[in-house]
Structure formats: C-alpha cells, structure tokens
Amino acid sequence: MNSARFFFGILLVSLGAVLALGAAEVIDSGEFISQWWPAVLVAAALVQIAVNPRHWLSPLFVGGLGVVLLLNTTETVDADVWPAAWAALLVVAGIGVLIGSLGGRSDAGDTADRVREFTAFGGRKLVSHSKSFEGGTLGAIFGGTELDLRDAELAPGASIDVFAAFGGAEIRVPVGWRVDTHGLPLFGGFENEVEGEGDEFSPALDINATVLFGGLEVKH
C-alpha cells in the first residue's frame, strides 16, 4: 500500500464529510476547518514517522508546528506560552540545519530490496544499492522525493507505485534499463527521459504513477 496515496485519500474523504455535514447544517464547516486544519500537519508527521522511523527530525518539526498552530486555532492555551513554543520549534529547526550542514545521517547506502517512502512538507533522497531490487512505493505530498537506482540491480518483475500530490518524484536509473511509465497525470505530468532505451532482454522497471498537480521524472 502506498502510504501517501492512502493519506491523501483519507484527507479527501474527511474534507468531503466535513463539507457534507456543513451543507446539512449539522456543523459550521468553515469554522471547523479554520480550527482544525493544522491537524493535517500532525497526522502527516505521524504517518511519516511510522513509515520511516529512522528519519524523524523533519516530521517532528512539521508535527510540532501543527501542534502549535492547532493550540492557537482552537484557542486551547494562553497567549503567554507562544514565545516558548516558537522558541522550541526554532531550536528543532536549527538542529536539523546543523545536522544537514555537518553531514548528519544520510539516506544513502540502503541495500533493502524494497523501498517504502512517504514525504510530506519536505524532501527526501534515497540511494539504493540493492542487488535484487524488487520495487516498492514512493509518495510525496507538498514535497519531493528522489530515488537513485544507478547502483542497483533489478529483480524480475520490479515495479514502483508512485503517488505525488502538489509535489514531485524523481527516479534515476542506470543506462540500459527499460523503464515503462503509466498511470494518471492530473494537472501534472510524466517525463521519461529514458523511454525507448534497452530491448526485450534489458532489465525492466515498471512504474505506475498518480500525479496530482505535480510531476514524475525518470532519467539517468
């Protein structure tokens, strides 16, 4: 299951339900959305941490921002706590910048045969060194994700499910691979720079993509 596709689907269903309740005059949908929209940031952060627990810093910042905004929009806490809350967020952001500038933890060097990536409100790069890469899922919502397969080798029937909404995905492959892309580009598009390369005996990668207001790029 593509975590980004599932998350975005739940988000749309929830929004539709709120609007329907508003139309039925059960709730004030405008007020409900204005109060609770930061919960989307918190939920996105929790899903990202669940999918990739090793990469928790960026989701932690997004989730923390969502909590602070949520406490503000719902008027749960006193205004006196805001200086401390924003200061804590700045500290987390600063730690993230320092880790990045000092070389911190890298996404490179993954030898797993399958990938499962979900990025929201940020970016992520994964370099695979798998010698029998089977595929997996890539997802990006209001962000971007890059998968570098130039040092990987394909298993038979390898396929990747890509979902990008208001964001993009980039997949890099070695020269000589045959890459087939198909799916649904809605207010977005696919760019397969390696289309037509390889032959029937070449390693083949199948990419099924759904792109909403975003893009998918395949290149060397």
Image (cartoon, grey):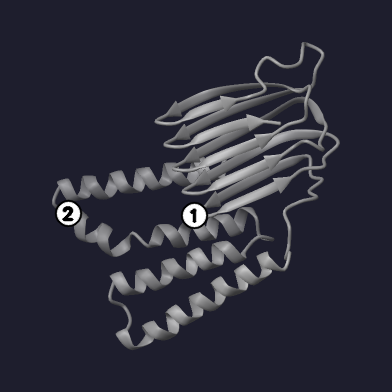
The residue at which mark 1 appears reads as 121
Which image quarter: residue 66? bottom left
Report the quarter where the C terminus lies: top right
Residue 217, how many percent across, how many down? 59, 32
Residue 144, how many percent across, how many down? 55, 46
- Tell me, for residue 26, which label it has, or none: 2
Residue visible at 57% across and 55% down in the picture: 48
Which image quarter: residue 173? top right
Q: Residue lying at the far bottom in this picture: please name it.
A: 80
Which residue is at the front of the view, 118 or 87? Answer: 87
Residue 23, how many percent across, how many down? 16, 46
The reply, left or right, for residue 82 in relation to residue 195 is left
Amino acid, disc 1: Phe
Q: Is residue 85 above or below residue 196?
A: below
Mark 1, secondary structure of its residue: loop
Q: Residue lying at the far front in this picture: please name it.
A: 101
Residue visible at 23% across and 47% down in the picture: 19
Q: In the rendered structure, are the residues bearing label 2 and label 1 in contact, judged by CB atoms less than 8 Å apart?
A: no
Amino acid, disc 2: Val
Q: Residues within 10 Å of mark 1 (few under 14, many from 20)?
A: some
Which residue is at the front of the view, 139 or 95? Answer: 95
Which image quarter: residue 114? top right
Report the quarter where the N terminus lies: top right
Residue visible at 65% across and 71% down in the picture: 98
Q: Residues within 10 Å of mark 2 (few under 14, many from 20)?
A: few
Which residue is at the front of the view, 8 or 150? Answer: 150
Q: Residue lying at the far left in this picture: please name it.
A: 25
Residue visible at 48% across and 33% down in the picture: 211
